[in-house]
Image (cartoon, rainbow, N blue to C red):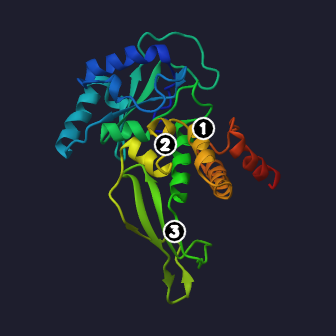
């Protein structure tokens, strides 16, 4: 997710997604192809690529799967990048209308991610255009930021990086889900300085059920629907957290939005709770 592995791929229109998915299913024999699509595929007018979740495979099965893709899409149309398999696929029922943001080439990049389908569908969820002015990336940053403030237990002593020497908090992990962790600072005894990387101990089993995650983050007052978008998460924060804590959460959320490589340099229609801190950041540059 993010970035093109092929130079001659472009965006796909939402009307072209269904026939293209059917074409991929025919070529790969993947079942329930429409249920494998992740993120904003089919929810926005144009998508930059198609992300599909596939069940984990053994090394031998992976070789067979890659060979099947090469048979379907050609040797030069398949690449392996770390744990990701990506392919260049001809868009089916392609029409020449243009996307003002990105090129249209008649080809689309399709990425295959290997993992638990239900969890990936939750983690890589992206709201529809009519539901949110922001991306699924914003949603995950909002969840991750809120997790860091949920049932937070921090020592008063700070290390050289202005972090609590001991901290219990929740963490939003793309691999594990929502987990509670215990972070402690370490010192280099030779230089008597703090080491940048903190030790981290996992304190709880990972939570991957949306309703359970909402139960924790929203103090028993939210449901899975409240995790739909960055806006819905921000709205819940204003309803259940004290004003002082809201300020800390929204300041950190704004910093995290601005720091993200994929969205930080773009102007977005942020809710006012976030926009005020975005504007403060720009004014102080």
The residue lying at 50 percent from left, 76 percent from top is: 185
Q: Is residue 3 visible?
A: no
Mark nearer the N terminus (1 vs 2): 2
The residue lying at 49 percent from left, 50 percent from top is: 217
Instruction: Report helix, strand or loop for mark 3.
Output: strand
Q: Nearer the viewer, mark 3 or mark 2?
A: 2
Which residue is situated farthest in the left direction here?
A: 60
Distance CA(mark 1)–CA(mark 3): 26 Å
Mark nearer the N terminus (3 vs 2): 3
Q: Position of residue 155 (x, y in %)?
A: 55, 75
Q: Where is residue 172 in the image (x, y as percent from the top left)?
A: 45, 52
Distance CA(mark 3)–CA(mark 2): 22 Å
In this figure, which residue is indicated by the disc labeled 1? 231
Of 244 and 95, the residue lying toward us:
244
Of 72 and 254, the residue lying toward us:
254
Which residue is situated farthest in the right direction here?
A: 283
Q: Which of marks 1 and 3 is in front?
A: 3
| Residue neighbourhood size for the residue with mark 2, other residues' Cα within 10 Å, grouped as few (<14), some (14–19), many (≥20) | some
Q: Nearer the viewer, mark 1 or mark 2?
A: 2
Relative to 195, residue 51 above or below = above
Q: Is residue 224 visible?
A: yes
Q: In screen coordinates, is 15 left or right of 134?
A: left
Q: Position of residue 12 (x, y in %)?
A: 49, 20
In this figure, which residue is indicated by the disc labeled 2? 222
Q: In screen coordinates, is 85 left or right of 220?
A: left
Q: Which mark, residue 246? A: none
| Residue neighbourhood size for the residue with mark 3, other residues' Cα within 10 Å, grouped as few (<14), some (14–19), many (≥20) | few
Q: Which mark, residue 153? A: 3
Relative to 113, residue 207 above or below = below
Relative to 241, residue 78 above or below = above
Q: Where is residue 70 in the image (x, y as percent from the top left)?
A: 28, 29
Q: In screen coordinates, is 63 left or right of 227?
A: left
């Amino acid at each position: 997710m993010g970035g093109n592995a092929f130079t001659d791929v472009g965006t796909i229109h939402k009307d072209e997604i269904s026939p293209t998915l059917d074409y991929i299913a025919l070529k790969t024999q993947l079942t329930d192809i429409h249920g494998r699509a992740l993120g904003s595929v089919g929810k926005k007018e144009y998508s930059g690529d198609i992300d599909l979740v596939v069940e984990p495979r053994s090394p031998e099965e992976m070789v067979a799967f890659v060979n099947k893709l090469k048979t379907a899409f050609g040797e030069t149309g398949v690449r392996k990048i770390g744990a990701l398999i990506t392919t260049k696929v001809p868009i089916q029922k392609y029409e020449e209308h243009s996307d003002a943001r990105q090129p249209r080439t008649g080809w689309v990049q399709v990425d295959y991610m290997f993992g638990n389908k239900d969890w990936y569908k939750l983690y890589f969820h992206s709201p529809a255009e009519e539901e949110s002015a922001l991306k699924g990336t914003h949603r995950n940053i909002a969840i991750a930021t809120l997790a860091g403030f949920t049932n937070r237990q921090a020592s008063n002593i700070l290390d050289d990086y202005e972090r609590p020497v001991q901290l219990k908090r929740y963490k939003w992990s793309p691999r594990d889900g929502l987990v509670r962790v215990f972070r402690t600072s370490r010192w280099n005894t030779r230089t008597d300085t703090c080491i940048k990387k903190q030790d981290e101990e996992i304190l709880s089993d990972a939570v991957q059920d949306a309703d359970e995650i909402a139960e924790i983050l929203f103090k028993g007052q939210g449901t899975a629907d409240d995790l739909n978008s960055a806006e819905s998460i921000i709205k819940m924060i204003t309803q259940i957290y004290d004003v002082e804590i809201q300020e800390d959460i929204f300041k950190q959320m704004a910093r995290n939005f601005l720091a993200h490589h994929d969205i930080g340099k773009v102007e977005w229609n942020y809710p006012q709770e976030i926009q005020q801190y975005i504007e403060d950041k720009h004014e102080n540059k």
